[in-house]
Image (tube, rainbow, N blue to C red):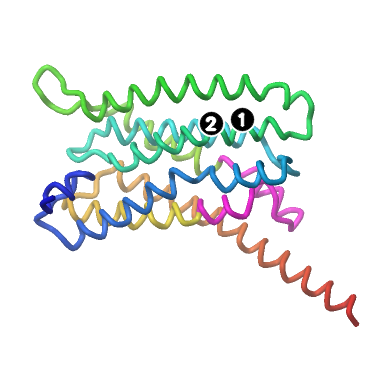
Amino acid sequence: MTLEQIFGIYTLDANYPISGWIAWTFATISIILTVIVGLPQLIYLLKNKDTGEGVNFYSFWIVFTGSIGWMLIGSWDVAPVKMAASAIANMLSLCLFIFTIYFTYRYARNEQKRKKAWIAALVSSLIVVAASALAIYGLVGKNSKGEALKMWPQLHAVCVVVFPMFTTFAFFPSVIKSLEQKRFMGMSKGMLFTILSINVTWIIYRFNLGINNREFTSGLITTMVWQFVSLSIYLSQVYLLILNWWQKKKNKSQLNI
């Protein structure tokens, strides 16, 4: 494969190889991390067969909705160069997230929630199929003039604000509750560190994408700002993990005295 073909995977300009390679590398890492974002939680559920304490079910649906939005923003982007990497990553991530949602209900401590497991799986599956078809059409389709399909600018301006808010603040109620009780809960540790890594890698990718394309569009800047906010929120949970670890270590030392 030529450099143009390799960079073409993520619609990057081969005339600027340094920013192109950085963007290409972190786009690939970001895709992998985004695809598996629900995997740590899924593994936790399958291993423990218990959804756990402090889990807000609507948080997972908000993340699900946010991922749908990210996929459509990337595939119907109004910019000359679409955020194809984001669209593809979220498309694959949603397929896995269907199972995460199902087992979150399946192993819930509330019997009423457990009865809704198959309904949740069916609804999420139908939504993913429909939204993915729309996203693929946005990525490969052309209008009557042979130009790439784009979202209405006004709609795009709303989407780049609303949908990132969903993924940024999805677990915010759990975060607030955790901070109030000074106890980490609401998701698995694996999912937390995956989300943190996703924010870092997407920020690096989008920054270098802007450099490579010689333009930082309003959509690109807005999504980067939201990911910085998301990074700050989830870093507070790392603080709680360290605090809880220190308290356990301190209590253990006192017992041994």
Element carrying mark 1: helix
The residue identified by callout 2 is 98
Position of residue 18 relative to residue 8, above or below, is below
Position of residue 74 relative to residue 251, above or below, is above
Residue 68 included in the magenta stretch of the image: no
Position of residue 5 relative to residue 65, above or below, is below
- Point out the stretch of residues depicted in magenta: 170-195
Question: Is residue 107 found left or right of 146 in the rendered image?
Answer: right
**For the residue marked with disc 2, what is the amino acid?**
Ile
Give the residue at x 18% y 50%.
7
Instruction: Give the percent coordinates (x, y) of residue 139.
Output: 25, 30
Task: Considering the whole magenta stretch, tell me its main secondary structure.
Answer: helix
Residue 183 included in the magenta stretch of the image: yes
Instruction: Give the percent coordinates (x, y) of residue 133.
Output: 34, 22
Task: Indicate which disc residue 139 carries.
Answer: none
Question: Is residue 4 found left or right of 57 in the rendered image?
Answer: left
Residue 128's quadrant in the figure?
Answer: top left
- Quadrant holding the C terminus: bottom right
**For the residue marked with disc 1, what is the amino acid?**
Tyr
Whether pointer 1 and pointer 2 mark residues with C-beta atoms closer than 8 Å, the reply is yes
Task: Indicate which disc residue 102 carries.
Answer: 1
Residue 249's quadrant in the figure?
Answer: bottom right
Give the residue at x 68% y 22%.
116
Element carrying mark 2: helix
Q: Nearer the viewer, residue 47 or 237?
A: 47
Question: Is residue 174 found left or right of 137 in the rendered image?
Answer: right
Give the residue at x 68% y 30%.
105
Disc 2 crowd rating (10 Å Cα; few below 14, some 14-19, many 20+) is: many
How many marks overall?
A: 2
Give the residue at x 29% y 27%.
136
Mark 1–mark 2 distance (CA, rounded to whole Å): 6 Å
